[in-house]
Amino acid sequence: MQLHALSAPTDVVFALAGDVRNNSRAIKQLRLVRSLGLTATVFALGEDSGAPFLDEGVHLRLLPRPPGGGPRFFWRVHSLFLDAARAVRARVYHASDLYCLHALRLAAAQHKARLVYDARELYPHVASTARRPWTRAYWHLAERLDIGAADAVFTVSDSIANRLQQTYRIARPEVLHNVPPMQHPEASGLLRERAGAAKDTVLVLHQGSIQKGRGCFKLAKAMRTIHGAVLVFMGGGPLKPALARTVRELGLGQCVRMVDPVPPDMLLPVTADADLGVTLLEDTCLNHQFALPNKLFEYLMAGVPVLASDLHEIGAVVRRFDVGRLVHLNRPGALAVAIQQCVDDQDARQRWRARTPRVFEAYSWTTAAARFTEAYRQLLP
């Protein structure tokens, strides 16, 4: 894709190496950009569905997703986003992940604009770099090359903010937790209907992408011994076909169901149908130890208690507010025991559910939004 002529100028060029239409963090940030009266041109990967995206002040331009992964994928993405971003004159270039950062740094330099970086992962230490020191070193160097040029850096947890500050000798990034805007959703009944689950059956939900390192296969296999519950996977992802095949091969069709994801704005009333939400990041990398994923806060905002991996940041939330049960995935049989105990103990689930609102006294999108908008006001006085 070669773009030579400059397109109409905009206030913000926002880039994400994924499908922004299904990315709740990006959508929340773009709405804040609009709340400041700014226009945005969004570059993302995906196929055009023809459906409108946000409002007329946000212009979405979808780029074809390159094949492959790792550093080769990065350079293909870099080339796509560099051509696209250079062709639009903006006041701020907002890289919503590391894969876009170098391209947007070059575009910002070309147009003498400001640069924003959202470090939504601890990229050198994600699951795909585990036991691959050269790959980890590559992503470390890629991030080091550009993060110091950013006028503002955001991230998702205090642990990642501290790590970035110490590693790269930068000002501590602003922490924008992956918390939904405050709401009180009523259960829609749609999830139970799609899953074909009876009203007296405990509905266990895993929502979000089905991919490596998220415990999806362990979760499905654990259901072989579970009574009184149905497990629903609601989401897409690269491993969804393989997981569906495993469910068929193990004869788990009666207790494991797979349903399509719903748009972010429709998610919480569907989530509220569940009796237990599951987030099972595996302890394979530092990024998982430091993660505070969207699904954790989405479950809790919907009043759904959680069964979660006992990792550093996630475990701290669950323990502090007593909103679920923690499990060590590396202990044989521990997951199945934990699921069955959660299914059988209705009193515990009710206690956990009653305590979910307390989480949002400490983790607030209102607070995160104020940090985001103040950072933008500093960039664009």
Image: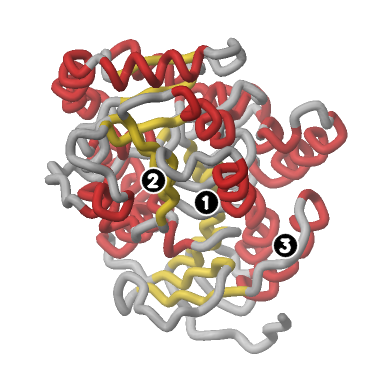
Indicate the amino acid at tag 2.
Answer: Ala
Secondary structure at numbered mark 2: helix
Q: Is residue 19 visible?
A: yes
Per the image, the residue denoted by label 1 is 116
Q: Position of residue 302 (x, y in %)?
A: 22, 38
Q: Nearer the viewer, residue 204 or 326?
A: 204
Quarter of the picture holding the N terminus: bottom right
- Mark 1 is on which residue type? Val
Q: Is residue 344 positioned above or below 262 on the image?
A: above
Q: How crowded is mark 2: few (under 14 residues within 10 Å), some or many (20 or more)?
A: some
**In-front residue for pair 316/239:** 239
Report the disc number at residue 375. 2
* Figure label count: 3
What residue is disc 3 on? 78
Q: Decide: marks 2, 1 in contact (CB < 8 A)?
A: yes
Location of residue 54 in the rendering, given as x and y in whole percent from the top left corner: 32, 70
How far separated are the C-alphas under marks 2 and 1? 9 Å
